[in-house]
Amino acid sequence: MTAFVTRGNGLFEGWLARMRASQANRLVPGKLREGRILDIGCGSYPYFLSHTYFKEKFALDRLDTLESLPEIHWFNLDINKANYLPYEDNYFSVVSLLAVLEHLDPNKLVVNFREIYRILKPGGRVILTTPAAWSDRLLHWMADLRLVSKEEINEHVYAYTLPLLGWYFGIAGFALGKIQFGYFEFYLNMWAVAVK
């Protein structure tokens, strides 16, 4: 696999990708790994999918992969423009969106979350990470210093809070009692899990 983990460059990008992948892997119960995972917005460098075990791995991104990855089923789609995800109902055990929400049109998130709910199996879970709203200015400063990818940070369109993420999960159909939240990476990032 290439040494790149994202578009652009930044001194901390490799470490941040490892931290996100580690956090996501901790949130996946072993029994779900015998099913299928879909990583939405994995970018051209599907770091998490390359560093996790699942019986079947699927990637969805608007960009093409830069690697030949026969163990990953790749599909190109810009979910900012689409109103559907091209998968059957109840198809995936896990859907992940790692450092993706902040790049998406907030007006499309209700549609996106409902589609994620539709394609998840009962008992399956969606796992996401996104920067904490308060860290936005800090991230732009870090991008200017090339500590993180300027290309990625400049594409951030919205910053989320934990209550707002809960609202999106709820309106998509996830029961509030089946949602968990937390922080990682020195409280700069949030993680969330919702079980169908």
Image (cartoon, rainbow, N blue to C red):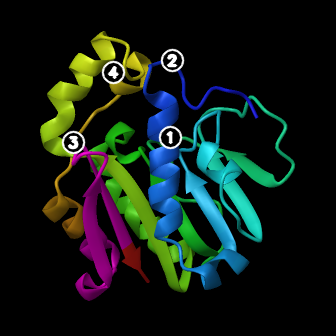
Pick whichever of labels 3 and 4 is earlier in the sequence: 4
Name the foreground residue: 128 vs 170: 128
Is the C terminus in the top left, top right, bottom left or bottom right quadrant? bottom left
Residue 90 in view (yes/no): no
Residue sitting at 25 percent across and 57 percent down?
Answer: 183
Q: Which of the two discs, 1 and 3, sits closer to the camera?
A: 1
Q: In 3D space, how far apart are the residues under numbered discs 4 and 2 (Cα atoms)?
A: 11 Å
Evaluate if marks 2 and 3 touch, with contact meaning CB atoms under 8 Å apart: no
Relative horizontal placement of residue 1, taking residue 85 as reference (left or right)? right
Pick whichever of labels 2 and 3 is earlier in the sequence: 2
Q: In 3D space, how far apart are the residues under numbered discs 1 and 3 (Cα atoms)?
A: 19 Å
Element marked by disc 4: loop
Q: Residues within 10 Å of mark 4 (few under 14, many from 20)?
A: few
Which quadrant holds residue 99? top left
Q: In 3D space, how far apart are the residues under numbered discs 1 and 2 (Cα atoms)?
A: 13 Å
Element marked by disc 2: loop
Q: Which of the two discs, 2 and 3, sits closer to the camera?
A: 2
Evaluate if marks 1 and 3 touch, with contact meaning CB atoms under 8 Å apart: no
Residue type at the position of mark 1: Ala
Q: Which mark is residue 107?
A: none
Residue on which the image places disc 3: 159
Name the foreground residue: 53 vs 171: 53
Residue 188 highlighted magenta (yes or no): yes
Residue on which the image places disc 4: 154
Pick whichever of labels 1 and 2 is earlier in the sequence: 2
Q: Position of residue 194 (x, y in %)?
A: 37, 75
Q: In 3D space, how far apart are the residues under numbered discs 2 and 3 (Cα atoms)?
A: 21 Å
